């Protein structure tokens, strides 16, 4: 199947959502935040009355999860459908450990790239992005550089916080954002005890003794995963039709892959999709192709972008980090 991109022409956003439910039972554990715990808040309900909502997964965590589907942990390589997509591979210290710009939390802004004593990438960035100490930065030029060496950053954004790169003003926001909310929630309180049958009254500060604990999980009327693809931003990169099609297809494949295989968010938060991914905007006939259909399109689009000269050759930039 070839994706009909014409259905998306002239639309600034592609808004999608999927209904989720606990895979077993009715309880789930939402994400927690330091000194806060779960993010619980009020929102307008269907009947106009306030309803209680909990944030199951934040935008920043969802970005990490959508990136994770691009990397094959078992084989320690990029996912096969993405072979040929540029990224930066970092050999750490003596080469027995590695990381890369796909799995690094800040992508190209990783300290293992920009603070390395191997300045290959930093020197390239200074050369290609020079001359913008004053005035507006050229985000299309930044997009061209990102497409060449770390294409994934055009989906999930990057902030080059180096003072010698236009004073740290080079920034591209996420073109794909997502979050998960549970609506109409009620707390499900429980607890337990860490038992020490040898010395129940031992020093708990050292790990001995019986230790009771409290646990709060939640039930919900509905759990919704929301996805927002900013197609206007992708077009504004000015990279051409093949690049636009690749980035949109890549974003949709990430969503499908996450929904198909990435919904075990925590030990006590294992979710399943109810029905199918729904397109909420634009209104019309466009439906998101299946994961298999999107996967089949990716190699051809990667080859087209490489033929356009958008991607580095070789696609993987090698770097060595010997810092602290």
Image (cartoon, grey):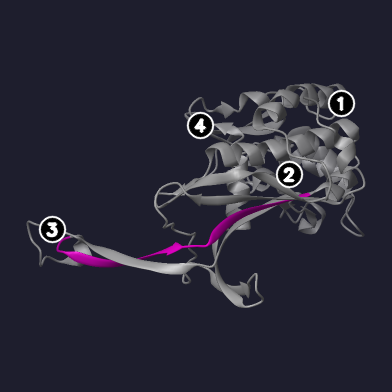
> Which residue lies under the disc numbered 2?
155
The residues bearing labels 2 and 3 have C-alpha atoms spaced at a distance of 49 Å
> In this image, 164 relative to 221: left or right?
right
Q: Secondary structure at mark 1?
A: loop
Near mark 3 (Cα within 10 A), the count class, few <14, some 14-19 or many ≥20, is some
Instruction: Give the extent of the magenta segment.
Output: 208-229
Which SS class for mark 4? loop
Q: Residue at x 75, y 56 (%)?
A: 163
Q: Residue at label 1? A: 309
List x then y, in percent, for residue 271: 49, 48
Q: Earlier in the sequence, mark 2 or mark 3?
A: 2
Q: Residue at x 63, y 72 (%)?
A: 45
In primary-sequence order, the first of circles 3 and 1 is 3
Kindly indicate whether the residue at mark 3 contacts the one at mark 2 (C-beta within 8 angstroms): no
Distance from disc 3 to disc 1, alpha carbons, whole Å, reads 64 Å
Precedes in sequence: disc 3 or disc 4: 4
Q: Is residue 154 above or below residue 220?
A: above
Spatial CA distance of label 4 from label 1 is 29 Å
Q: Which of the marked residues, 2 or 4, is nearer the chain's N terminus?
A: 4
Q: Which mark is residue 73?
A: 4
Instruction: Give the CA separation, mark 2 to mark 1.
Output: 19 Å
Q: Is residue 314 visible?
A: no
Principal secondary structure, stretch drawn in magenta: strand
What residue is drawn where x is 83% and y is 34%? 245
* Image quarter of residue 246: top right
Q: Are marks 3 and 1 in contact (CB under 8 Å)?
A: no
Residue 15 among those drawn in magenta: no
Tag 3 and tag 4, C-beta contact below 8 Å: no
Q: Disc 3 versus disc 4: distance between alpha carbons?
A: 37 Å
Closer to us: 58 or 199? 58
């Amino acid at each position: 199947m070839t994706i009909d991109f014409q259905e998306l022409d002239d639309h600034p956003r592609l808004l999608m959502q999927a209904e989720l439910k606990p895979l077993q039972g009715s309880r789930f554990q939402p994400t927690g935040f330091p000194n806060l715990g779960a993010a619980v808040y009020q929102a307008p309900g269907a009947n106009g009355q306030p309803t209680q909502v909990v944030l199951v997964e934040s935008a920043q965590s969802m970005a990490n999860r959508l990136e994770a589907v691009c990397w094959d942990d078992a084989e320690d390589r990029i996912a096969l459908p993405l072979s040929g997509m540029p990224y930066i591979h970092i050999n750490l210290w003596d080469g027995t450990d590695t990381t890369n710009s796909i799995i690094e939390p800040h992508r190209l802004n990783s300290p293992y790239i920009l603070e390395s004593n191997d300045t290959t990438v930093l020197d390239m960035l200074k050369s290609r992005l020079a001359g913008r100490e004053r005035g507006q930065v050229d985000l299309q030029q930044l997009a061209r550089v990102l497409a060449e060496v770390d294409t994934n950053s055009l989906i999930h954004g990057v902030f080059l916080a180096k003072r010698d790169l236009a004073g740290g003003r080079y920034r591209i926001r996420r073109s794909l954002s997502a979050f998960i909310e549970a609506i109409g929630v009620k707390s499900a309180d429980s607890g337990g005890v860490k038992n020490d049958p040898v010395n129940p009254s031992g020093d708990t500060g050292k790990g001995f003794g019986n230790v009771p604990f409290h646990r709060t999980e939640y039930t919900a009327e509905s759990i919704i995963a929301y996805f927002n693809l900013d197609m206007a931003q992708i077009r504004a990169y000015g990279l051409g039709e093949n690049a636009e099609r690749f980035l949109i297809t890549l974003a949709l494949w990430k969503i499908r892959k996450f929904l198909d295989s990435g919904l075990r968010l925590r030990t006590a938060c294992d979710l399943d999709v109810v029905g199918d991914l729904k397109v909420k905007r634009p209104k019309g006939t466009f439906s998101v192709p299946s994961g298999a259909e999107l996967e089949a399109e990716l190699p051809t689009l990667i080859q087209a972008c490489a033929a356009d000269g958008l991607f580095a050759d070789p696609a993987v930039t090698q770097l060595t980090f010997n810092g602290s």
